Image (cartoon, rainbow, N blue to C red):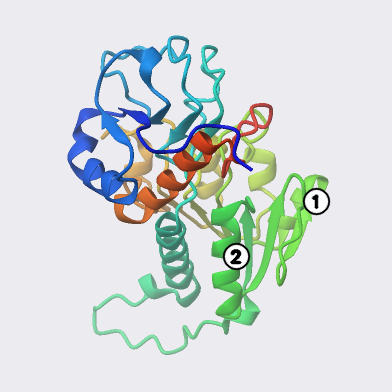
Amino acid sequence: MSTGRGAEGMRVLFAAPAHLWDAWSPALRAACPEMELCRDGDPAGFDALIYAPGYPENGQALDFTPFTRARVIQSLWAGVERIVTNPTLTQPLCRMVDPGLAQGMVEYCTGWALRTHLGMDRFAQDGAWRNRLTPPLAQGRGVTVLGMGELGRAVALALAGLGFRVAGWSQSGRPVPGIEVLAGDALPQALGRAEILICLLPDTAGTRNLLDAERLALLPPGATVINAGRGTLIDEAALLAALDRGRPGHAVLDVFRQEPLPPDHPFWRHPGVTVTPHVAAETRPASAAPVVAENLRRAMQGAPLLHLVDRVRGY
């Protein structure tokens, strides 16, 4: 079964910004006590790297070439667009798929979808009795989830469980039991039914500026866009112009091309935009450390790795 040596005694480099060490090192050591977790050392002496962008902290991209013994690069984050393009990376790269991350994304997207659906912001506390603003039931509201990976599937199923008319869209159209999944060229159809559009696509060459002026115009009037995927998905100028036309009617944005979002960015001032500071889903050490430990053991035992990144697709 195993072609490699056992996991006992493996040396692992914590190749992540220094401020993450105090939170992550206890959880990682508890989940994988057999490893030697290091913050520095001879690159040729490490069996694996636990990596997050921002390392090294000199602003330069990490050179993976000297890590000749490393059997896996385990990302701490779900997004790997800042890693996969590194030309020195030849080792297997695994992205983070963490149950806590998925739960956080479900809670964020469900919360904002319900707030939008119920029109909760329409009820100003000003003494006016607005009892004619009753929303439809969830089955009367069309929701589309762009991106049907681990996070998209979890969000789509949660919203379907609340009764919403949920459809998903992905380039491949891979089936998800209980969810209508549209593929590829059916993107206009997916957008046209989306009274609430939830964007959970990765950052790839095929998704950048996917929501441009032409595609935003396909949304129903007054639709809400919730982007918790990647900021590069949306053409920012096109979105601002579309909001001025009421199509969409509102955008809840958690991710941006530049983060932190500059204080003078027009998103802060536009009445049709709600900015949240990249808080939709966080990788939490307690739930993610067992995922890391499992992949480290698999790498050392020569077993198939979990959540291996496809270099061609970029995720």
Task: Report the front residue among 314 and 224.
Answer: 314
Q: Amino acid at mark 2?
A: Ala
Q: Is residue 99 visible?
A: yes
Q: Position of residue 294 (x, y in %)?
A: 46, 47
Q: Earlier in the sequence, mark 2 or mark 1?
A: 2
Q: Note whether 203 is above or below 173 in the view shown.
A: above
Outermost right residue: 185
Could you tell me which residue is drawn at 35 percent across and 45 percent down?
278
The disc label shown at residue 201, or none = none
Quadrant location of the N terminus in the rendered image: top right
Could you tell me which residue is drawn at 27 percent across and 50 percent down?
30
Q: Quadrant of residue 64?
A: top left
Q: Position of residue 309 (x, y in %)?
A: 60, 35
Task: Report the front residue among 242 and 306.
Answer: 306
The answer to whether residue 291 is left or right of residue 20 is right
Q: Secondary structure at mark 1?
A: helix
Q: CA distance from mark 2 to mark 1?
A: 18 Å
Tell me if mark 2 has few (under 14), some (14-19) or many (20+) residues whose alpha carbon lies within 10 angstroms of its own: many
Could you tell me which residue is drawn at 33 percent across and 42 percent down?
34
Q: Which residue is mark 2?
A: 156
Q: Which residue is mark 1?
A: 186
Q: Secondary structure at mark 2?
A: helix
Q: Position of residue 165 (x, y in %)?
A: 66, 73
Q: Amino acid at mark 1?
A: Ala
Q: Quadrant of residue 141?
A: bottom right
Q: Position of residue 12 (x, y in %)?
A: 35, 29
Q: Note whether 26 is above or below 43 in the view shown.
A: below
